[in-house]
Amino acid sequence: MTAAEMQSAEHVLMDKGISVQELMRRAGQGAAQMIWRIAVDLPTLVLCGPGNNGGDGYVIAQWLLEKGVDVQVAMAAEPKTEAAQHAKSLWRGETQKLSDAQPRTQFVDCLFGTGLTRPIAEQWFQHILRLSTGAKRRVAIDLPSGVESDGGICVNEIPAFDTTIALGAYKPSHFLEPARSKMGNVVGIDIGVRASSNLDVVAKPRLSAPDAQDHKYSRGLVAVVAGAMPGAAQLTAMAAQKSGAGYIKIFAPPGFATPHPSIVVETVRDGNGLREKLADKRISALAVGPGLGRDERASDMLHAALASRVPLVLDADALTVAGSRFSDLVATRSADTIATPHAGEFTGLLLDALQNRIEDSRNLARRSKATILLKGADTVIAGCDGKTSIPASTCSWLSTAGTGDVLTGIIASRLANAVSGYRAACEGQWLHSRAAILAGPVFSPEMLIDQLPAALQECL
């Protein structure tokens, strides 16, 4: 949940008679139990701020104290909220001023949590750095102090933590860079929040094997449009083949070599030729962009694809050719459309620099009436209805040439299996990331493709 959604969800609980003090007790004791299970009885310093995150810290410290842990509190300022004041009144251990506190083996950061929007005062932040640097283990409660909750932004140059304990619900910044890389292992504590949100974590797909009545067309015919750089389209086709589609074709200029005998290559010279091919109602999904080029033929092919009624995945050169006209070109399509831009391509589509990956992706999805998969270290998938998903984790080894072409093929294959554009994008992202993990470090796109059947097998 965003900070605003979390605040609304807490108010729903309070309207039902659950006090702020009770929510703080649930959050603090739940976090303390997690700390206890992971680190048992390390000498601990809990840094408490003036707000409710600081109140959580007093609850954590008291619970650990009652377990026999050697725990101290470093107080940045007196509590300002009634709930935090109440929590401090129940603390029976040693309290030090922040400036007097010394590093201990375990550091627990409860200075600021959800809702922070501006940098922490320098006199406080330098003590965070001093105390965290001197610790062997670092734990952040809800969010590391210095992280804005909704956009993955670090408003301060925060230190790295070993564990971050989310309270009530995960926040966008638990999964967005650069904040996510600072949080270590992220775990959650349930405090009873049951509100809904349009933001979700990409889930492992639930797929089914073909039954006795299936055939190559019922499993989906994926067509890939090739252009100036044949290797990219070949990778897309090979990925679609190993992601569950029943039949793969490549529509290519003369002289194109098939990547495998089981993949059919048909010559298409121009947009008119592509229009004729796309009249085949057996085609379930079309991938356009990888290796397409950016010349007149590429533009002609793109417009032919957009004019069809075939579900469509757009990537790479197709997005560059569409540019700022993307939303207008796509919004009138009757079939599902998925676009998979990286940050640079995204800027060209929206004609504005990325500010907030979630909100900007939703904005483009709404304008274009398409599903947007914004690629990167923190992928965001947005549907035109506002529903948005973020992967819980990604594989940094995917940062190599050709892996985006593979992703396009996977998504096209899932789209060809008669699922919605949004679902196809989510399933494709999960399979792509999982195949990368199975491939191990330092792989080529071909090695990544070879792991796709194993990734699919895990979803059956």
Image (spheres, rainbow, N blue to C red):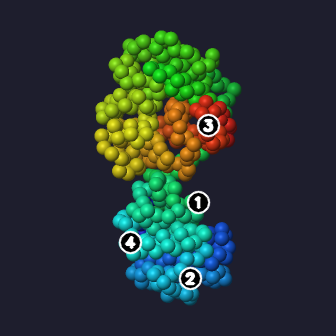
Could you tell which of marks 3 and 4 lies nearer the N-terminus? 4
At 68% from the left and 37% from the top, the residue drawn is 454
What crowding class fits label 3: few (fewer than 14 Cα within 10 Å), some (14-19), or many (20 or more)? some
Helix, strand or loop under label 4: helix
User: Closer to the camera: disc 2 or disc 4?
Assistant: 4
What residue is disc 3 on? Answer: 443
Q: Is residue 408 above or below residue 78?
A: above
At 62% from the left and 19% from the top, the residue drawn is 260
User: Closer to the camera: disc 3 or disc 2?
Assistant: 3
User: Closer to the camera: disc 1 or disc 4?
Assistant: 4
Check disc 2 and give the amino acid type.
Answer: Gln
What residue is disc 1 on? Answer: 185
Q: Is residue 67 above or below residue 279?
A: below
Could you tell which of marks 1 and 3 lies nearer the N-terminus? 1
Q: How many angstroms separate mark 2 from mark 1 (CA)? A: 24 Å
Helix, strand or loop under label 1: strand
| Residue 108 % position (x, y) | 54, 73
Q: How many angstroms separate mark 1 from mark 4 (CA)? A: 27 Å
Numbered-mark total: 4
What residue is disc 2 on? Answer: 72
In the image: residue 349, left or right of residue 28: left
Q: Are marks 1 and 3 in contact (CB under 8 Å)?
A: no
What residue is disc 4 on? Answer: 122
Helix, strand or loop under label 3: loop
In the image: residue 363, left or right of residue 290: left
Q: How many angstroms separate mark 3 from mark 2 (CA)? A: 48 Å
Could you tell which of marks 3 and 2 lies nearer the N-terminus? 2
Could you tell which of marks 2 and 4 lies nearer the N-terminus? 2
Check disc 3 and give the amino acid type.
Answer: Phe
Q: How many angstroms separate mark 1 from mark 3 (CA)? A: 25 Å
